[in-house]
Image (cartoon, grey):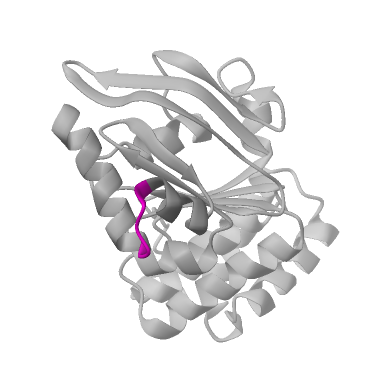
Amino acid sequence: MIEVSGLAKSFGSVVAVRDVSFSASNGQVTGLLGPNGAGKSTTLRIIYGLLRQDSGTATVDDIDIMAETRRAQRAMGVLPDAHGLYVRLTAREHIAYFGRLHKLPEEKLSARIDELLRLLDMQSIADRRVEGFSQGERTKVCLARALVHDPPNVLLDEPTNGLDVMTTRSVRELIGELRSRGIMVMFSSHMMHEVARLCDQIVIISEGIVVASGTTDEIRDAAREDNLEEAFVKLVERVLETA
């Protein structure tokens, strides 16, 4: 479970996050939805422990991220927006490398690698160097290394961005599988249909604040709109008018 309260972060004179509060429960998919520049990625980077907030708190399974960063990071699997891969390593070697960073015993690591290769349908690319991989293949490697230590919380920053139809479908199926295992899944997106289809809870962020949160129905009710996209636009425009 992840809880954030009153998060704020500025970069010089630029305010990226003003006041963000929400919780994401185990066994649910929480979507961070907002226009580009809304503060979604900054919020996720604070939760990852990559950025330090100016104010507010963020906890992962009741572990304060600022106070116990390493311990909190061990409870998370993260797919960031920058998918750095070592081009001379194979897919299998990437997963093994990250498993060893998490200090998984070799016997357990070997079994976990085989499980992830099957789960993500990566058997055909497992022993190829990632140099020359397609965007979808690279994303699968990044997902596997994020999941290798079987984390109870998984955070994905726009996981289907730039993917083809088949890989997008695989990622969606993976998210459903993680939810069924009781894992907390959080992902950011600006794709309305994806959020509506996958999420149990939606958190809409605009201008660095939470403008609405709840189920799809609750979001539509808050905006008095039947369509989620129309509700999103109305709620965001309200903030822009007062900014």
Which quarter of the image is occupied by the N terminus? top right
Residue sitting nearer the eye, 146 or 13 = 13
Q: Position of residue 238 (x, y in %)?
A: 23, 38
Residue with the most extreme front position: 224
Residue drawn at x 42%, y 40% as measured from the top left: 212
Q: Answer whether residue 17 is magenta in the image.
A: no
Residue sitting nearer the eye, 144 or 13 = 13
**In the image, residue 32 above or below residue 89:** above
Is residue 73 among the parts visible in the rendering?
A: yes
Residue sitting nearer the eye, 220 or 71 = 220
Which quarter of the image is occupied by the C terminus? top left
In the rendered picture of this protein, how many numbered marks are placed on residues?
0
Residue drawn at x 27%, y 19% as measured from the top left: 10
Q: Is residue 183 left or right of residue 236?
A: right
Is residue 89 among the parts visible in the rendering?
A: no
Residue drawn at x 74%, y 43% as measured from the top left: 103
**In the image, residue 124 above or below residue 198:** below
Q: Is residue 146 left or right of residue 112?
A: left
Q: Position of residue 108 (x, y in %)?
A: 83, 59
Q: Position of residue 125 (x, y in %)?
A: 52, 81
Q: Which residues are magenta?
A: 223-227
Residue drawn at x 67%, y 57% as measured from the top left: 148
Residue sitting nearer the eye, 68 or 54 = 54
Does the magenta stretch mainly form a helix, a strand or a loop?
loop
Q: Position of residue 16 (x, y in %)?
A: 27, 28
